[in-house]
Amino acid sequence: MGRWIIPPNLHSEIIGGPLCFFHEHSIGSKDGRVPRYSDSHACVRCVSSLTEGRLTLDVHKIHRKHRRRFLEFWSFVEIAEPDECWHWHGYTNEQARASYFPVPRHWHKTRQFSVMRVATWYTWGDIGRLPIKRLCSTRDCCNPLHVRIQGVPHYYHSRRLHLIDLEFSSHKLDQETLLFLRATQDKDPSRFALMEASSKMWLDFRMSSDGPVSRELMETVDDLDDDDDDDDGSEFSLIT
């Protein structure tokens, strides 16, 4: 599918929409809806955070309903240094030569989105279908500093702070995804089997290091979102 064309009167109307990926943006919602722009479907508060240059990799800032999918996504990412490309090792469609991750969105029937778009949603914010532009030559890169969202001001004035924060957060997320994989293997073997079908070699590599499993995380796996089955990509329609 081609890139969404930005309308001349972008973000002129705000409507109620489904809860945001970030739980802070859903605080105070009594009807399960949050302010979203009618055209891009972006979360109003996420766009505001984006223009202020806010970036996060903290799973605890993600709404509980979306944490399982958040951790599963980053489990397939080769999290490297902040100035390096972060390669994807998960779902791919060889015929289309595209890397994707299934995420249900209320505004489109497809659930297959490019990994860079999903990485953007989970770091810069839920920008809906606003166009994005890669700042590197790696097609499957998931480094949030290697993408720029188009259509809204996207400030990088605190890039040094982003690098410092991203370096700390990425190492923390690396450990959290390892614990998530081990907990899923033990508590939800059917889900883990689906993940293995995507990239068993990568998961074996990720789980080869030793370390304690958090009891809290083990208990949490049962409660994480199970709102739908993952799409196997048999009918491929990627949204970049």
Image (cartoon, rainbow, N blue to C red):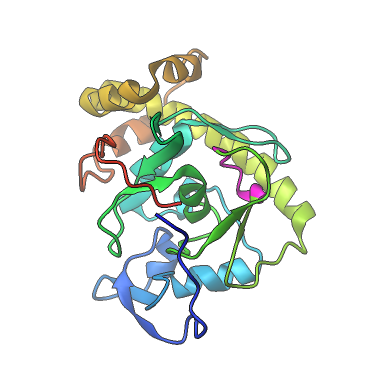
Asked if residue 164 is among those painted magenta in the image, a careful observer would answer no
Asked if residue 142 is among those painted magenta in the image, a careful observer would answer yes
Residue range of the region highlighted in magenta in the rendering: 140-146
Query: Residue 167 at x, y = what percent?
Result: 69, 40
Left or right, 228 with respect to 164, comes to left
Out of 9 and 158, give the one closest to the viewer.
9
Q: Residue at position x 33%, y 31% from top?
A: 218
Query: Residue 156 at x, y = what percent?
Result: 73, 62
Left or right, 224 with respect to 84, comes to left
Total tally of numbered discs in the picture: 0
Out of 154 and 55, give the one closest to the viewer.
154
Q: Is residue 5 above or below residue 102?
A: below
Q: Residue at position x 26%, y 22% from top?
A: 193
Q: Residue at position x 65%, y 72% from top?
A: 153
Q: Is residue 164 above or below residue 49?
A: above
Out of 135 and 191, give the one closest to the viewer.
135
Q: Residue at position x 53%, y 71% from top?
A: 47
Left or right, 16 with respect to 92, comes to left
Query: Residue 142 at x, y = what percent?
Result: 56, 41
For the N terminus, the quadrant is bottom left
Q: Is residue 214 visible?
A: no
Q: Is residue 222 above or below residue 205?
A: below
Quarter of the image holding residue 226? top left
Q: Is residue 3 visible?
A: yes
Query: Residue 75 at x, y = what percent?
Result: 45, 32
